[in-house]
Image (cartoon, rainbow, N blue to C red):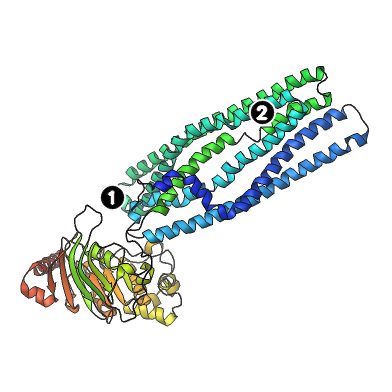
Amino acid sequence: MTGPGATTRRAARAPLARTLALARPVSQRLILATLLGAGAVGAGIGLIATSAWLISRASQRPEESALALAIVAVQFFALSRGLLRYGERLAGHDAAFRLLAELRVQVYRSLERLAPAGLPAFSRGDLLARLVDDVDAMQDLLLRVAPPFAIAAVVGFCTVTLVWLALPSAGLILLAALILAAVPLPWLTGCLARWREARQAAARGALGERVLDLMQGAPELTVNGALEAQLAHAAEADAQLTRVSLAGARTAGVGQGLTTLLCGLAMWGALLVGVSAVRSGQLAGVLLATVALVPLAAFELVSGLPAATQTLARVRESAARVFEVLDAQPRVPMPAQPVALPAPPHHISVRGVRARHSAHAPWAVDGVDLELAPGRRVAIVGPSGAGKSTLASVLLGFLAYEQGSVTLNGVEISRLAGDEYRRIVGTVAQDAHIFDSTLRENLLLARRGATAQELDGALDRVSLLDWSHGLADGLDTEVGELGARISGGQRQRLAIARALLADFPVLVLDEPGEHLDTATADAIVEDLLEATEGVATLLITHHLSGLDAVDEVIVLERGAVVERGTHRQLLRRRGRYADLYAREQATRYVDVRSE
């Protein structure tokens, strides 16, 4: 799969070209925005030119009729400049926002394909920076990069031509100044900015990661006295981003200063040759102010180009980072032509499955067999690192298996569409996400059309009904971010109720009692086994209490099955399971004595 450090060839080769390709559906709006922008700049130049001529001509006290056309032209250029600029902003931002909307949809679709196994390739803070800052930066290609260069080329040619017709030497001076300001100067600032923007994009990601860790881990950091150290790390990341940004601002300042210098030289050069031309009779005196001031207005065309090249460097880096996400390959490839889901009842059969997390890693699951028929309940136990959660990822279609088979009613799950398959096989993970919303909304995620009776039924199956009815706001009670306003046991039961409400034919329960005290974990497992009666259930746990209610217990070590049988059978064998059970009971006895 492709990760942050392994940009795909296509993204590395042409991130800007790919961004422009995404903008093809809004190309007409972009062309319209560019034409309106060219008209606005042209109107500004026309305003300066006609105003200068009008003032010079008025100083000669001609008949009023001789000035009428110029007065109308000044009014026309003044009004049209504002209207055209407004139209350019409207059309340009409309195109940019349409591009961003489409781009965000593509990014979220890519994340949906990657989740959850592929997302760890990107750190959370860095991924957030890509989704927000980098995606937003890509609109600048349409707003602050492409239009200024196109407008400068078109309007600059027309302006130089008009000045040339009035005074060829002044036209040459203006042409030379505009070329210097439009070509070597932006190229220089672009070269200075290119490497800096790469550092700035990485620094934004690092800062986002630090801030996100601080926000989510603040309670633990405070309790353990590590908050100050983490704040110092975040401050250093912020200082690094500030240093890179200040260096970019200095580059932009140098570019703007050189542009202003060229503008002044062009104006004074045109004035000098204009004075000489007036003295020799080559240029009418009334046009001198126009020839001298038009370069001043014309430099509006190129004054933003150095900044545009800096923006171009930032857009290139941001686009490359976004395309890394878009081009990342899911851990489980989707079939080109998925097979239709088999009809119920659904039965999952696992035969000799071997899976690992990377090509050169040891087998995390090594030759596992199991059966999940309707109503059958199987428990997977073993020490940490035995491969229990890896097996769950395989069954959920989140991790590809390299050998063996996993079939749903005889159909290999690799031939099924992932989204459709996961409507059959659901999960409750040890870190199931509780959204910062109400109890009702967290439940309705499983089934949007669920009735109040169905919601109460799901809560009753996990022993939360009386508790929820006792709340002042009932199901409209806010649970807080990650369920912070309810207890750990209530969070886990709420996640289980959500899965039960979804009515999955096959349910994978991955350490439902993890991070909870022993009594709460035992109660949750007991309620779970009762609530999932009649559902094909795979219970992954290291709590061995209550497993006499399951049909089969499978003991894993280093990915392989070392024992299997019922709870009673395994205890009578006095093997690995019996050892684990004895240790757990001894630990419980010590905990009770200490209380």
Q: Report the residue at 64% width, 27% height from top.
A: 177
Provide residue 320's location: percent of width, then percent of height. 44, 46
| Residue annotated with mark 1 | 224
Provide residue 301's location: percent of width, then percent of height. 65, 36
Number of numbered labels in the structure image? 2
Q: What SS does tag 1 mark?
A: loop
Q: Report the residue at 78% width, 28% height from top.
A: 166
- Residue 550 shown left or right of residue 7 in the figure: left
Nearest the viewer among 354 and 96 is 354
Circle 1 Cα neighbour tier, 10 Å, few/some/many (<14 / 14–19 / ≥20):
few
Q: Is 351 placed above or below 213 here?
A: below
Q: CA distance from mark 1 to mark 2?
A: 67 Å
Q: Quadrant of the C terminus?
A: bottom left
Q: Is 69 placed above or below 362 here?
A: above
Q: What SS does tag 2 mark?
A: helix
| Residue annotated with mark 2 | 175
Nearest-to-viewer mark from 1 and 2: 2
Disc sitting over residue 401 in the figure? none
Provide residue 439's location: percent of width, then percent of height. 41, 71
Tell me the kind of residue under disc 1.
Answer: Asn
Nearest the viewer among 19 and 93 is 19
- Residue 391 shown left or right of residue 167 in the figure: left
Q: Report the residue at 66% width, 39% height from top.
A: 154
**For residue 458, which quarter of the picture?**
bottom left
- Residue 29 shown left or right of residue 202 in the figure: right
**For residue 354, which quarter of the picture?**
bottom left
- Residue 546 shown left or right of residue 328 in the figure: left
Q: Is residue 55 visible?
A: yes
Q: Earlier in the sequence, mark 1 or mark 2?
A: 2
Residue closest to the far right: 63
Q: Is residue 466 visible?
A: no
